[in-house]
Amino acid sequence: MSAGVRDQAAEPRPGAQGLARLTPRELEILELISAGMSNTAIAGRLSVMERTIESHIARIFAKLGMSPGPDENRRVLAVLAYLRDTEL
């Protein structure tokens, strides 16, 4: 394992404990994201406007402490946090 990988492993993961802050609707949306659904598909499934889904996702990222950056994909990081938190 390289030093860079070791350093990253020691840092707290974004969203590691933030899922408790999400509303039931935000968790539902994050679950649908983790199933591979697009914003458009989620909006259709929940019978809401796509802009509503975008707003929910922005709040999910904020609650999980995920700022936009060139090196990370917040959608993937949010799904990873969800999957880690929901492991049995």
Image (cartoon, rainbow, N blue to C red):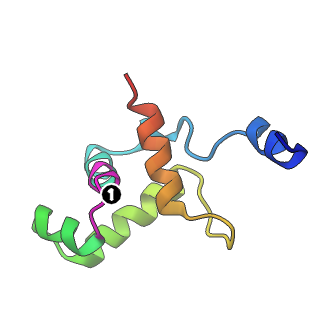
Position of the C terminus, as image quadrant, is top left
* First to last magenta residue range: 31-38
Q: Does dot 1 land on a helix, a strand or a loop? A: helix
73 or 51: nearer the viewer: 73
Q: Is there any visible trace of residue 21 in the rendered image?
A: no
Q: How crowded is mark 1: few (under 14 residues within 10 Å), some or many (20 or more)?
A: many
Q: How many labels does the image show?
A: 1
Q: Mark 1 points at which residue?
A: 33
Left or right: 55, with 13 as reference point: left
Q: In this view, does 9 lie above or below 33?
A: above
Q: Which residue sits furthest top?
A: 88
Q: Which residue is drawn at 39% across and 63% down?
A: 57
Q: Is there any visible trace of residue 51 in the rendered image?
A: yes
Q: Which residue is drawn at 29% across and 71% down?
A: 39
Q: Is 36 contained in the magenta span? A: yes
Q: Is 49 contained in the magenta span? A: no
Amino acid at pointer 1:
Ile
Left or right: 72, with 64 as reference point: right
Q: Residue at x 29, y 78 (%)?
A: 51
- Residue 2: which quarter of the image? top right
Left or right: 46, with 23 as reference point: left
Position of the N terminus, as image quadrant, is top right
Q: In this view, does 57 lie above or below 7?
A: below
39 or 6: nearer the viewer: 6
Horizontal and vertical percent for residue 67?
62, 63
Q: Which residue is drawn at 61% across and 47% down?
A: 14
Q: Which residue sits furthest front?
A: 1
Q: Is residue 30 above or below residue 10?
A: below
Horizontal and vertical percent for residue 32?
26, 54
Horizontal and vertical percent for residue 18?
51, 40
